[in-house]
Amino acid sequence: MLTDILIQHNRWDRLSGYPRPAPAVTVVVTHYEQHHLLGRMASALRRQSLPPRQVVLADDGSARTPAFTVPGIETVVVSQPDQGFRAGTARNLAVERSTGEVLVFLDADTVPEPGYVEEIVRHVGRSPDVLAVGRRRHASFAGLAEDESPGPAAVLPEPAWLADAYAASGNLLHADGRSFRFLIGAVLCCRRSLFHDLGGFDERFVDYGGEDWDFAYRAWNAGAVLVHERDAVAWHEGPDWAGRGEAEAIMEYQSARLAALIPEPATRGAPLPGLIPDVLADVHTDGAFDHTVRTVHALLRQTHRDLAIRLPTRDERLLETYASAVRTAPWTEDQLRRARVRFEVRHPLPETAVERAVALISESDAGLVELVHDGEVQAVAKSTRAVGRARRWSARFEPGEVVEHAFGRHRLPVETDDRNRTLAGFFARWE
């Protein structure tokens, strides 16, 4: 049973009055050489208060294919060659074989308590936009029977940075553009429809880590609603990675990889607009030649530097000037999904205009910002987050309705350059 509720921003608390869902669930268990834990996982899944319809074990290249079954539940085992840590690819392979309308992701060393599935689907079942993360606790499994939960003596410390983040954000109710760092692949849940809308996990992530943060970033950037389901508890064998000696080097590699693909400023650290820009700016070319030049030049002078410009023209005079600074081809799907803001620019903008509009979108979760001078729209900035949510609701609502209802429209006054000045005079003002 699913309900489809369109909510504003990240306000998952507005879903509390709707019936508790009992959807058809596929549990995807990611596994690599953890055969000794599979009996414990099978026992835990068999005891769920909301039993899954199906369990798919996603084996990431173990030397022997795991023998795994959950009595009374359809169980499928999929496997891929060992070509390094490819958890995202393994999960994608498992989803291809899934039948449930809701996907619950677990790792083989992260064992759910009996109420886990019922709790992790609480908000996912009410809104197709929800991406939920459970609570991963840590313990030693030594000496525990397969059907036994860890007692106080076996419990290990939880990562303080994660617990603090959930507390500070009200279990992600007050999530923002950096909150993707608090979603962990070992305890994720979403609808199959959202998973496919996002294109699944990015299979460029090889070796340890990052594919879950990348998935969560793309989810937020596509208008997902982030929820921490604190009552959905799963126990991880052993400490968090921060408690292991190899963690430091791994995290350094992970940070560099994420910076290349995630343009969120604190994640990236410096503008890297070549492959995945933060801002995509499309320039309208229906005006006079000199007007187009002024518009492009004004974009090149913006204080927000993580920006790429598209100039869809065959005018050789324009291409001679801007061939190395703009693109004429359409944006790639990767760029459209990962850039945080898309601009349509008709007139020259002051140097700080893009920076101000991006700040308004990121700080207030706005969907659309019109940059206006003397009542005339100079440019329109759209949040990729709002565009993504509107896309998923397009069968029921017009895109503009979703953008305005769920995120809101704003007007941002801007100054403009003297359009009567010659190009030579326009260029000279930048000295």
Image (spheres, grey):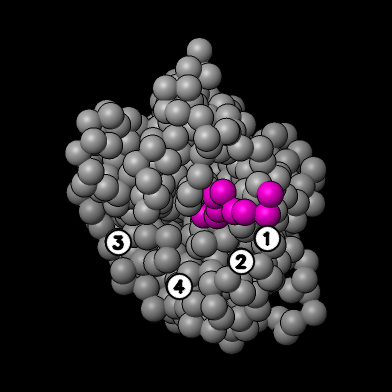
**Distance of label 2 from label 4 (alpha carbons):** 20 Å
Q: Select label 2 or label 4 by which is in front.
A: 2
Which residue bears the numbered disc 2?
403
Give the label on residue 193, or none. 4
In the rendered structure, which amino acid carries the disc numbered 4? Ser
Q: Position of residue 115 (x, y in %)?
A: 67, 69
Marked residue nearer the N-terminal end (2 or 4): 4
Q: Position of residue 428 (x, y in %)?
A: 48, 17
In the rendered structure, which amino acid carries the disc numbered 3? Leu
Marked residue nearer the N-terminal end (4 or 1): 4
Mark 3, secondary structure of its residue: helix
Which residue bears the numbered disc 1?
409
Marked residue nearer the N-terminal end (3 or 2): 3
Q: Is residue 62 above or below residue 45?
A: above
Which residue bears the numbered disc 3?
93
Taking depth in this image into account, of 26 and 376 the one nearest to the observer is 376
Marked residue nearer the N-terminal end (4 or 3): 3
In the rendered structure, which amino acid carries the disc numbered 1? Arg
**Mark 1–mark 3 CB contact (< 8 Å):** no
